[in-house]
Image (cartoon, grey):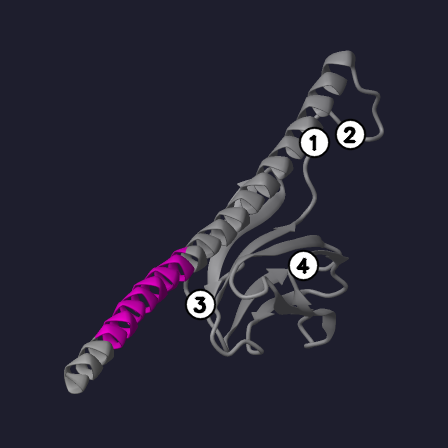
């Protein structure tokens, strides 16, 4: 089962096993996840960086013999699908080692297996009734809706992070401008005061 240290989340949907999680990836760090799969099993990986730096991470996938199946650098998001050729533990890693001071928040969706038919009598070799066809169509539409909702949630989380970061920068900039205005105002007052002090001293000297 997919695990991160001793913590894992497993969701069963028919015969398809899926894991969705969001995790923190510190700077100069690497996180790996492991899944034991049988031979000839299809698995899909979707990931997206939600927050941090330039919203990019390095990622790679290896098979039980440590052969690299997927390797991408500084990706904001990507998808990867493959059918296993051997039984064993497959590894999915995300690296933020190129970043020295920014941590990232990464969303990961890992799915493997084949989806079973909605009804046991529904197979590809048999014709579907109108009711069964409607059920299949609704099921496919609902899967699209779920994927769309997930995408919108990720976009909302990413946009909210960007907005909060922009708000923080604007706040600091406004505070700096306010302090600068006070310093300039006090400096101008002191400068004008020095002009009048010098004139008063010169008038007293002449008299």
Q: Mark 1, mark 3: which one is toward the viewer?
A: 3
Q: What's the distance in space between the residues labelled 4 and 2, CA to CA?
A: 23 Å
Q: Give yes or no for contact between labels 2 and 1 (Cβ–Cβ under 8 Å).
A: yes
Residue at the location (63% across, 36% down)? Answer: 148
Percent coordinates x, y for residue 194 in the rendering: 24, 77
Q: Nearer the viewer, residue 169 or 79?
A: 169
Furthest-bottom residue in this view: 205
Q: Quadrant of residue 142?
A: top right
Q: Main secondary structure of the magenta part?
A: helix
Q: Earlier in the sequence, mark 3 or mark 2?
A: 3
Q: Give yes or no for contact between labels 3 and 4 (Cβ–Cβ under 8 Å).
A: no
Magenta range is 171-196
Q: What's the distance in space between the residues labelled 1 and 3, CA to CA?
A: 34 Å
Residue at the location (41% across, 64% down)? Answer: 6
Task: Please indicate, yes or no, whether residue 110 appears anywhere in the rendered image.
Answer: yes
Q: Earlier in the sequence, mark 4 or mark 1?
A: 4
Q: What's the distance in space between the residues labelled 3 and 4, CA to CA?
A: 22 Å
Count residues near mark 3 (Cα–Cα under 10 Å), then give few for <14, some for 14-19, many for 20+.
few
Residue at the location (65% across, 51% down)? Answer: 112
Instruction: Quarter of the image for the C terminus: give it.
Output: bottom left
Question: Is the residue 48 above or below the residue 94 in the image?
Answer: above
Count residues near mark 2 (Cα–Cα under 10 Å), then give few for <14, some for 14-19, many for 20+.
few
Percent coordinates x, y for residue 76 in the rendering: 64, 60
Check disc 1 and report the residue beneath it: 117
Q: Is residue 179 magenta?
A: yes
Check disc 2 and report the residue beneath it: 123
Question: Is the residue 171 above or below the residue 25 in the image?
Answer: above
Check disc 4 and report the residue beneath it: 38
Q: Nearer the viewer, residue 171 or 136?
A: 171
Q: Nearer the viewer, residue 10 or 174?
A: 174
């Amino acid at each position: 089962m997919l695990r991160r240290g001793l913590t894992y989340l497993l969701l069963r949907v028919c015969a398809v096993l899926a894991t969705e999680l969001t995790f923190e990836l510190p700077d100069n760090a690497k996180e790996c996840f492991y899944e034991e799969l049988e031979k000839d099993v299809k698995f899909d990986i979707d990931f997206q960086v939600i927050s941090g730096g330039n919203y990019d991470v390095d990622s790679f996938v290896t098979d039980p013999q440590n052969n690299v199946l997927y390797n991408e650098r500084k990706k904001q998001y990507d998808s990867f699908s493959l059918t296993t050729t051997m039984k064993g533990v497959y590894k999915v890693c995300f690296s933020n080692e190129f970043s020295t001071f920014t941590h990232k928040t990464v969303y990961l969706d890992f799915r493997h297996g084949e989806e079973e038919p909605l009804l046991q009598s529904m197979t590809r070799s048999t014709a579907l009734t109108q009711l069964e066809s409607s059920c299949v169509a609704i099921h496919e539409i609902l899967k699209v809706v779920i994927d769309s909702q997930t995408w919108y949630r990720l976009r909302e989380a990413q946009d909210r992070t960007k907005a909060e970061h922009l708000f923080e920068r604007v706040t600091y900039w406004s505070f700096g401008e306010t302090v600068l205005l006070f310093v300039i105002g006090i400096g101008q007052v002191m400068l004008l005061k020095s002009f009048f002090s010098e004139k008063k001293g010169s008038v007293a000297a002449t008299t």
